[in-house]
Structures are given as C-alpha cells and as structure tokens.
C-alpha cells in the first residue's frame, strides 16, 4: 500500500481581526484526536488558562525577548509583533512590504533574536526568514530569504534591513522556515522539500537527497537546498567548519528532510528537530552534522511499513497516480532498498502496519500523524513543571495538543510514548515557556482543519481560538478558561463510532425518501441534482465556504470562474487542495457529483452538472 499525504483548498486566509475569543466550555464533548493506540493524557486541571490575545494573522514563531515581551511573526500579514505577556497588548515592530503570502506555508516564517539584543553590545539584531515572489500574481515564482534587522529601541521599530542570503528554494507547500540562533553563534535554518512528489506537486522532482556541486555553490545556486537544514555565519556566508558532504562544503548541515518545522537547541547544545511525515511517521530527530535523514526514500525508520517511494517525476505522464497496480514504468523503491547511511529518528508518530486504514476514517486528520509544528526542549529544574521534566514539547496542528515526549537521562533518546496535554479544538503553531518555567504560551493558526473535540464528528474547520495566543499557568489550576479535552480516541473506537449511526454516512433524497441516489450524467436535470447537493454542501462545506459561497475560511465560490472546469472541481473535492481536506474517502462519487453540481450552479455560477463519471475519473 502506498500512503498518500492528504494534507491538502482553495483558501482565502481568514485573519483573527474582529473575532472574539471563542471558549468551548458549554459544548458537549465528543471524541478527541484519533491515535493508533491509547495515548496517556496529562492532568490539565493543574493549569489555569485564558486567551492572552487574539486577532493575529497566523502567528508562526514566538521568542521571549530581553524586554520580557513575546516577539512573534505573523505569517499572512508579514508583521513582526510584540505582545505583553500579562495584558496581551500588541505592538507592530515591522511590517514587511515584500513578503509573499499563500494559503499554507508561504509568508513571514522564522524568527531569531540575537542573544545580545538590548544588552548594550551593539548586536541589537533580529533575524527573520520569509518568502518573496519573483514572478507575477498569475505565475508566481517564489523564493525564500533570511534577513537581518536592527532594533531601534528609541523608535521601537526594526530598521536597517540587511539580506543575509536570498534565492533559497520555496514553493506553495512545505517551506519549513524555522530560524534558530545556535549556542555556537551560527544561524540554523530549516527548508522543506516544497511538497514535491505528492498532491498538486506530484510531478515536481524531490531534491531532499540531492546535494550541490562545487560550481553551484560558487555561483550561489541554492536549488538543491530543498529538504535540508542549513548552518550559516551571522553574515550569511558558509562557516569554515560546516560538514563536507559528498566532497562539497556548503550551507547544508543535514539533509533528507521532508518538512522540518521544529528546530531548537537543548540546554546542552543538542539540536532537536521534528518534521512532518506523509500519512504516518512524523519524526523526532537529533540533528548531526552531515547527517542523512532518509526522505524521500524512507519515512520514519527503514522498516517497509506503510510506505514506498514512488518517483512520479520520472514516471510516464500518461500514468495515473491511482493506477492499481502501478505499471513497471513507474519507479518504485521500498525502504529497504535505500543503502545510504541514515540517522534513524528517536521516535515516530506513528509507525503502523500496512493494513492500517489510511484515509478511511475521517481523511488526513484521522491518519496516524500528529503534524508537529515546532519543538521546544524543556528542563523543569526545581521550580518548573515537574511532570514535563527532561522532555521535548511538540505542539501539533491536527490535534491541537501539546505532546510532551519524555527523554532518557542523557537526552539522546525518547523514553516511551508522549503524553497529551492542554488539548483544545485549535491548530497549535508554536509553544513558548516563560522565564518562570511554569507559564506556557501556545500560538494558534487563524484557519485550517483539526480534530473535532466538541460536537458530533472527528474533524472540523471550526477553530475555537483562531489567530490567538493561549496562556496556561502551572500550579494555579481550577479556573480553566479554555475548552480543554482530556482524552484520545483509538482507531478502533473511532471506526466503531462512525458505524454506530451517531454520524450520518449518507443523505436521504428529500423527493423520494431513497438513500441510494442515481448516477449523475450529462443529461441529468441540473435543478434536481443541485437540490440533492444543497443539503450535503450545508453539512460538509458551508462551515468554511459559507452558506452563500463567500465564507472567510475557505475560497469564495460565488462567481468563481475556476468552477467551470469540471475536472478541477472533481479533483479538488476528491483529493483536497491546500488546507481543504480530501473528501474522496468520506463521500461517494454521487455525493461529490451532487455537491459539485450545486456549487457550479449557485451564487452566480452557471456551469452545468458535475457528473458521477467526472468524479470517478478524478479518483
């Protein structure tokens, strides 16, 4: 079985501006995130909680400043903002005018503060990583760059822009973008593989294993930096002690990464990393100089479990990804065929057998991954959170959960399974611990899909605290102000619930009372088909796209010329797009045809039926 990552919508970014903090205390709780096995849940009643601030445009990275303020980047507005950790008051320090923003991973990303910022040494530097567009709005040509600004304390603004390195690989997915200032005085930067070889980027070559030539480095051609972690001097140049890999010294510190969004140093100088797997095998790693971490030839460990690398960039154009079996003309590599030296992960989230029902429960949200968005090593000391001592903290997007992964005494390996803490119906983007070691700040995405924890479902696009920072204080429990959940759901429990009748799996035809709908064809009456699709749209799609096709969290469907392309509509509904989840595993071909016909002929659209045959072809 080939696992496919279905993290994939036509999305108009929804900012948090004007949105009040939505607390879920009064809602009925259903199930939490789906996991392959039962995961222990920490006692969130040990914490008090409240919404610190709202209205953030997809906060990405948080740092504790020397002024005892939270410094952060806002991905979609391109702003560096400072937040008072007590009052939540916001102050914009920088608004970029050249940032390129898209629906997922483009925009203003990483943030690092020079360790001597505001210490009187003159090194009042702030480093950011972000994407720019070298093309046009119609034909974007994005790249990434790392830029240094100087903080002017009198103006309380970031000034004096200096580009340290530009022309770094970027695209519409998996740009990673973490910027870390290391204890060695070097800058570390993570770059994903831009989603190559799956979804809408299926035919783009995956370069995570490709290394630069001497000529490319000399000419500052960084195309092979995809799927890598870089190490730079503070001026952007290549450090003299960077590893020599395959006979070439470059900025590359490690390679073979998929989407390494988590990157942080422990107190002892160990560099920890977390990265997204495809449909299983999110990873926790320790990064070693010159290390190869296997992607795309290996997901997790070399175990041939639920993954084969199919090189679609070398496959004939007329072969469909849904062909079963794949013809011999498509290059397929089992994990055990990878013979290079590879550094195995400390832990995976999670490795499952080939018979695991990937995509069959509630789409990618219920697949055995957690989507780790960041990482933070934690030592409690004498006054910290004792339950979290000697661990790494992993905020997650799909689960809206802070996983606390215990480590061995030397910090060099995982010690058992993680424990789930502070779980809410949100997408956690980053975690920060205050200097007191007992105050936890979690930044949330402004939009996207997550595990549904309040109500009757398993996945949802309704986030309770979009574009916010949630504040949890240890040792002051009993007055929780944020709707936390205390449980996880195993796959067997989830499948049993789906089959119990609590969640409807089909719709009744209001005209006939039948639940078995006839196929939609080119000769079907548009009004009749749209009448069947309307209730299904309301149930499945209106949360994001709005009942009138003009929702804030999803693409505007009203008067949308893209809907004229039946193949585009069918493919988007079946396989997902951007932040929109795939519905091919949840809805029948007829359901999708009826929904597609409804949206293609509503709100000023007049594009005819979407036939059942169109949907079958899209699969």
Image (tube, rainbow, N blue to C red):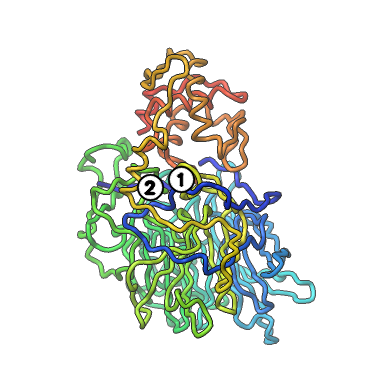
Decide if residue 395 is on the left or right side of residue 362: right
Task: Report the Cα–Cα distance between label 1 and label 2.
Answer: 22 Å
Q: Residue tagged by mark 2?
A: 198
Give the residue at x 49% y 73%: 188
Residue 496 lies, in percent from the top left, at 32, 43
Q: Nearer the viewer, residue 28 or 549?
A: 28
The answer to whether residue 498 of the structure is visible from this angle is: yes
Q: Residue tagged by mark 1?
A: 459
Quadrant housing the C terminus: top left
Give the residue at x 56% y 68%: 477
The answer to whether the residues at label 1 and label 2 have Cβ atoms under 8 Å apart is: no
Residue 77 lies, in percent from the top left, at 65, 55
Residue farthest front in this picture: 478
Decide if residue 360 is on the left or right side of residue 375: left
Residue farthest right in this picture: 154
Label annotation for residue 440: none
Count residues near mark 1 (Cα–Cα under 10 Å), then give few for <14, some for 14-19, many for 20+: many
Residue 531 lies, in percent from the top left, at 51, 19
The answer to whether residue 218 of the structure is visible from this angle is: no
Residue 207 to residue 214: above or below: above
Q: Secondary structure at mark 1?
A: strand
Mark closest to the chain's N terminus, 1 or 2: 2
Decide if residue 544 is on the left or right side of residue 274: right
Res 341 → quadrant = bottom left
Q: Nearer the viewer, mark 1 or mark 2?
A: 1
Count residues near mark 2 (Cα–Cα under 10 Å), then give few for <14, some for 14-19, many for 20+: many
């Amino acid at each position: 079985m080939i696992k496919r990552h279905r993290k994939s919508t036509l999305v108009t970014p929804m900012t948090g501006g004007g949105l009040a903090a939505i607390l879920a205390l009064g809602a009925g709780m259903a199930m939490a995130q789906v996991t392959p096995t039962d995961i222990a849940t920490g006692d969130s009643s040990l914490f008090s909680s409240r919404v610190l601030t709202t209205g953030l445009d997809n906060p990405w990275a948080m740092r504790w400043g020397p002024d005892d303020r939270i410094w952060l980047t806002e991905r979609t507005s391109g702003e560096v903002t400072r937040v008072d950790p007590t009052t939540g008051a916001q102050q914009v320090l920088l608004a970029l005018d050249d940032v390129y923003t898209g629906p997922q991973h483009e925009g203003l990303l990483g943030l690092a503060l020079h360790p001597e910022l505001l210490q009187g040494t003159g090194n009042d530097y702030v480093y950011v990583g972000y994407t720019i567009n070298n093309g046009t709005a119609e034909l974007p040509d994005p790249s990434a760059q790392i830029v240094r600004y100087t903080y002017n304390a009198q103006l309380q603004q970031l000034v004096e822009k200096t580009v340290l390195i530009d022309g770094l690989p970027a695209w519409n997915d998996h740009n990673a973008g973490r910027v870390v200032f290391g204890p060695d005085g070097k800058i570390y930067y993570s770059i994903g593989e831009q989603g190559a070889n799956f979804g809408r980027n299926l035919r783009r070559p995956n370069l995570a294993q490709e290394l630069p030539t001497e000529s490319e480095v000399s000419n500052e051609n960084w195309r092979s930096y995809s799927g890598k972690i870089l190490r730079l001097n503070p001026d952007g140049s290549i450090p003299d002690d960077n590893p020599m890999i395959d006979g070439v010294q470059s900025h590359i510190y490690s390679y073979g990464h998929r989407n390494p969004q988590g990157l942080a140093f422990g107190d002892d100088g160990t560099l920890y990393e977390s990265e997204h797997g495809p449909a299983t095998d999110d990873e926790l790693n320790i990064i070693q100089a010159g290390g190869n971490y296997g992607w795309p030839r290996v997901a997790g460990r070399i175990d041939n479990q639920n993954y084969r690398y199919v090189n679609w960039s070398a496959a004939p154009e007329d072969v469909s990804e849904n062909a079963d079996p794949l013809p011999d003309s498509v290059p397929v590599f089992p994990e055990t065929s990878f013979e290079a030296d590879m550094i195995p992960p400390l832990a995976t989230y999670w490795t499952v057998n080939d018979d695991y029902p990937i995509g069959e429960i509630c789409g990618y949200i219920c697949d055995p991954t957690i989507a780790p968005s960041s990482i933070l090593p934690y030592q409690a000391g004498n006054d910290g959170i004792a339950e979290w001592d000697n661990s790494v903290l992993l905020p997650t997007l799909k689960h809206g959960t802070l996983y606390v992964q215990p480590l061995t005494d030397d910090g060099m390996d995982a010690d058992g399974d993680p424990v789930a803490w502070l779980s809410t119906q949100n997408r956690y983007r980053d975690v920060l611990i205050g200097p007191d070691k007992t105050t936890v700040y979690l930044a949330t995405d402004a939009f996207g899909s997550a595990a549904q924890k309040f109500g009757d479902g398993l996945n949802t696009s309704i986030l309770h605290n979009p574009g916010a920072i949630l504040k949890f204080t240890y040792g002051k429990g009993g007055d929780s102000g944020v709707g936390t959940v205390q449980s996880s759901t195993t796959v067997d429990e989830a499948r049993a619930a789906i089959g119990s009748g609590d969640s409807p799996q089909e719709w009744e035809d209001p005209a006939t009372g039948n639940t078995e709908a006839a196929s939609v064809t080119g000769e079907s009456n548009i009004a009749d088909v749209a009448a069947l699709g309307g209730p299904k749209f309301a149930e499945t799609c209106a949360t994001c796209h709005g009942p009138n096709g003009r929702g804030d969290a999803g693409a505007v469907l009203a008067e949308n010329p893209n809907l004229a392309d039946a193949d585009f509509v069918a493919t988007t509904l079946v396989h997902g797009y951007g932040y929109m989840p795939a519905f091919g595993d949840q809805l029948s071909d007829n359901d999708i045809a009826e929904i597609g016909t409804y949206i293609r002929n509503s709100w000023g659209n007049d594009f005819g039926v979407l036939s059942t045959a169109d949907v079958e072809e899209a699969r």
